[in-house]
Amino acid sequence: MSYWLFLLDGIAVSVFGSVLSASFCDCLSTKRKRLLVCCCMSVILLLQGLVCFIWDFDFLRLIYPLVAHLPLILSLYLISKKFLWSLASVLLAYLCCQLRRWIALLTATLLSGDTSMQSVVQLIVTLPLLLFLLYFVAPSVRKLVHHPLKLQLQFAMIPALYYAFDYLTVIYTDFLHSGNPVAVEFMPFVFCLAYLLFLMYYHNQEQKELQLKQVQNILGVQISQSIREINALRESQALARQYRHDLRHHLQYLSECIENCQEEQAQQYIAQICQEIEAQKVQRFCENETANLILSAFVGRAEKVGVEMKIQGKIPAVITISDNDFCVLLSNALENALHACQIFVAKGVSSTIDVQFYERDGKLFLQVINPCSEEIRFKNGIPVSDRTDHGIGVQSICAIVQRYKGLYTFMVQDGQFVLRISV
C-alpha cells in the first residue's frame, strides 16, 4: 500500500510542478502550447518510470533534476523562447511544492500519523492547491517577465537558494535532518536577508516615485504658467484687434476735435487710449523676461482677488538657473503666497505680498513675504501639511534648490510667512 501511495504521490508532484511551471512561464495560453506541455509531461513521467523500473526510487531522487527539472526547463524554453524565465518558473514551482508537503506534514503530525498519512494528505491537497496557485498567483508571476532583467534575477534568487539548499541538505546529505544548527538556521537567515534587501529596494523605489511626482509637479506648474501666458496674449491680441477695428472711429473723433480747436480734449482722449493699451502689456519689473511674464501674470491674478503685490528687485536677462527651474521656483512661491492671502481676503482683511529679488556674483536671491492665518507645522525646517495635494510646491522648491546646491529658508515672523531662496 505504501509503495502505491508513494508512486501516486510522485506522479502527483510531477504533474503539479510541471503544470505550475508552464503556467508561470505562460505556456498554457494556447491549445498548441498546452498540447506541447502535455507531451513534455508524459515524456518526463515515462522517463521517471523507466529509471524506477531499472533502478529504484532512491536513485530517482538523486538524479531527479536530470530526468525531471532539466527536460522541463528545456521544453518550456523551446515553447516560450525565454530561458531565464523558464528556469525561474521551474525553481518557483519547486518552491511551491513545499506548500503541499508542509500542509501534509503538519496534518500528519497533529493526527499522529505516519508517512502513509502524509502521502494521502499530499494527494488530497494537490489539486485544490494547484487551482489556487493557477488562478491567484500565476497571473501576477507572469507579469514579472516584462520587467527588467535585474528584477527577474532578484525574483529568482529565493527559489534558487531554496532549491540548492533542499538538495544539498536533504536529498544528497542528511545535513538538515541531523539537526545541525547551520542547516536549520540557514533558510531563516536567507529570508531575513531577503526582507532587508526588499526594504532597501522599496525605499529606493519610493525615492524614485517621489522624484517622479516632483517632476510631474514641475511640468504641471510650467504648463499652468504657459496657459496663463497664452491667455494673456490672447486677451492682448483680442484687444489689439478691437483697437484696430475702432481705429477709424478714434481717428474720426480726433479729427473732429482738431477741427473744432478742442486740442486739450483730443490730448486727453489720446492719453486714455494709450493708458488702456499700456495696461495690456507685460509689465517690466527687471531685464529678465521670464520673471516679467510670471510676475505680470501673478500681479493680474492678485488684483482680481483683491491682493496687493509689492515687487522690488533687479535680475539680469541671463541667469545661471534655467528658465524652467526659475519658473517653477517663482511660480510655486507666489502661488503659495497668493493662496495664503486669499484666506484673509475672504475674511475682509487686506493683505500684501512683498516680493524682493536680486542677482549678485552669479547667485540669485529671492524673498517672498506674505501673511499667514494659521499655525504652520515645520519638519526639519520645511513646512508640512496633512491635506491632500498640499506641500508638493514646497517639495519642488526644495528639490530645485538642492540640485543647484543652494539654500532655502522657511520661517514665520510676527504673523508673516517668509521664504528666502539663494541659488
Image (spheres, grey):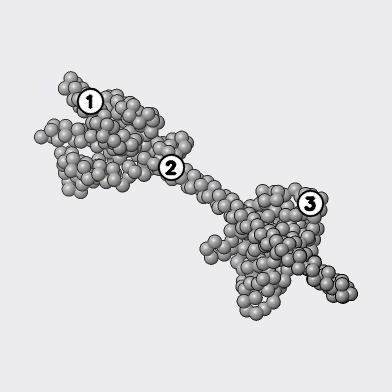
- Viewer-nearest residue: 293 or 88: 293
Image location of residue 128, percent across then percent down: 22, 45
Q: Can you say which quadrant of the picture contains the N terminus?
A: top left
Residue at screen point 82% across, 70% down: 254
Label at residue 317: 3
Label at residue 194: 2
- Which of the 4 quarters of the picture holds residue 93? top left
At mark 2, the secondary structure is: helix
At mark 3, the secondary structure is: loop
Mark toward the start of the polypeptide (2 vs 3): 2
- Viewer-nearest residue: 49 or 83: 83
For label 3, count other residues whose C-alpha is less than 10 Å away and answer few (under 14), some (14-19) or many (20+): few
Image location of residue 378, percent across then percent down: 62, 64
Q: CA distance from mark 2 to mark 3?
A: 54 Å
For label 2, count other residues whose C-alpha is less than 10 Å away and answer few (under 14), some (14-19) or many (20+): some
95 relative to 226, above or below:
above
Q: CA distance from mark 3 to mark 1?
A: 78 Å
Exactly how many numbered labels are in the figure?
Answer: 3
**Mark 1 against mark 2, which lies toward the viewer?**
1
At mark 1, the secondary structure is: helix
Q: Is residue 182 left or right of residue 18?
A: right
Q: Which residue is disc 1 drawn over?
A: 43
Task: Tell me which amino acid carries mark 3.
Answer: Ala
Q: CA distance from mark 1 to mark 2?
A: 36 Å
Residue at screen point 20% across, 25% down: 46
Mark toward the start of the polypeptide (3 vs 1): 1
Q: Do tag 1 and tag 2 residues touch (Cβ < 8 Å)?
A: no
**Residue, far bottom:** 348
**Residue, far top:** 54
Residue at screen point 70% across, 48% down: 322
